[in-house]
Image (cartoon, helix red, strand yellow):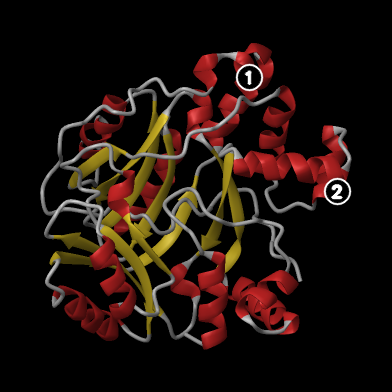
Amino acid sequence: MAAVDHSILRELLRGGTLWWWDVNPRTSSNELAKSIGTVRSTVWARLRQWKAWGFLSGLRAVPNPGLFGCVMGAGVVEVPRPQDKPAFLESLPLYEGVVGAWDFVGETVQVNVVGPSVPSIARWSQLFSKVTGVRAAWGFEPYRVPLPVSRPTKTDWRMLKELLRSPSTELADLAKPLRLTARTLARREARLRVNHFVWYVPLIDYARLPGTTFALFNVIPTNAGPHPVLLARLANVCADAVTLSDDSQFSLNEQSQMNTISAVVPYRSPGEAEDGQRRILELPEVKDVKMYFPRSNYFFGGWFDDRIDSALRNRTLGESSNSLVPTHDISHRSQGGESGRSLHVRTECLASASSRPAQHHWSP
């Protein structure tokens, strides 16, 4: 991976976790160039090349499920036959509450879900285990997310609707149907991000960057989190990591499978990635390391779109306490899952394979 590609990608994914990313969809190539110490033309050329390769196609806006009184979670589905995987992925948007997926090389698919309560997330394991072509489904559990810090207004709902449809559109163009000035819209859009109403997720296809193999490491520590010492050691061992996250901070369960540290690291080959896995295993605080090779990401916006439409039809939703307070008890401790299995990705998720074409962002 070229040094400039690595610098741009790390900057874009800075602060990234599973859903809530420190990404401003309207950051210019000039601003990116200043952040990484290069010139605007270099960043502009690389972003155009990434788009041509299909490596970075745009981004998606992801509304906070807490706006609708729901929790979010994820789990793993194993589809052993390669010929069954496309049909399984194609069927996912038909399930009420499935909002995204991440496909990995081999049998693994991570499925991202939302639901009205903590137990509703756990039930997805039973549901998917009965689907034709699925060998097993496990590890579905909720995780902690930032809750909205204020109540959405009717204009906020309308803005979320437009951002869900066209996340990268220039604010001047979005302002017209909303009957706002571009300056007012820019101020309100920034407030949506600050108040955790919406996050922006880069659309990255890790298999499309020539000469680069991305590995996702789920590092299983010997002790419960948090893991500041191990995190610091991993920052040295995985010096090229584009994301590095202590997942235990998102857990609602002390016995959670989310007691992991996850890292996405670029290598020149799968063999080099395996060498990286061995170096991680040599750390004294590490019990085990699971390695996966990410492929395509999917985001299904229908669930959000339906609920935003409902909020717009029912103008009192923006004034209801239920619109901001999840229906589950955030302190609830769900029962632990199967030990030793830990594919709860905290690094990149829910990029889009939507039927709507993603528009290029971080404009030159």
* Residue 99 place in picture, x, y as percent: 45, 40
Residue drawn at (17%, 51%) of the image: 224
Please state if 29 lies on the left or on the right of 105 as rendered. right
Residue drawn at (67%, 84%) of the image: 38
Residue drawn at (47%, 85%) of the image: 1
* The C terminus sits in image quarter: bottom right
Residue most extreme to the front: 229
In this rendering, does residue 165 appear at all?
no
Please state if 129 lies on the left or on the right of 270 as rendered. left
Q: Is residue 51 above or below residue 249?
A: below
Identify which residue, 288 or 86, lies in the foreground: 288
Badge 1 vs badge 2, beta-carbon distance below 8 Å: no
| Residue under numbered circle 2 | 172
Q: Which mark is residue 19?
A: none
Q: Earlier in the sequence, mark 1 or mark 2?
A: 2
Q: Is residue 20 above or below residue 293?
A: above
Q: Which mark is residue 318?
A: 1
- Tag 1: Cα neighbours inside 10 Å, few (<14), some, or many (≥20)? many
* Residue 204 place in picture, x, y as percent: 51, 64
* Residue 315 place in picture, x, y as percent: 68, 14
Q: Label 2 is placed on what type of residue?
A: Ala
Q: Quadrant of residue 280?
A: bottom left
* Residue 235 place in picture, x, y as percent: 33, 74
Q: Label 1 is placed on what type of residue?
A: Gly
Q: Secondary structure at mark 1?
A: helix
Q: Quadrant of residue 286?
A: bottom left
In this rendering, does residue 100 appear at all?
yes
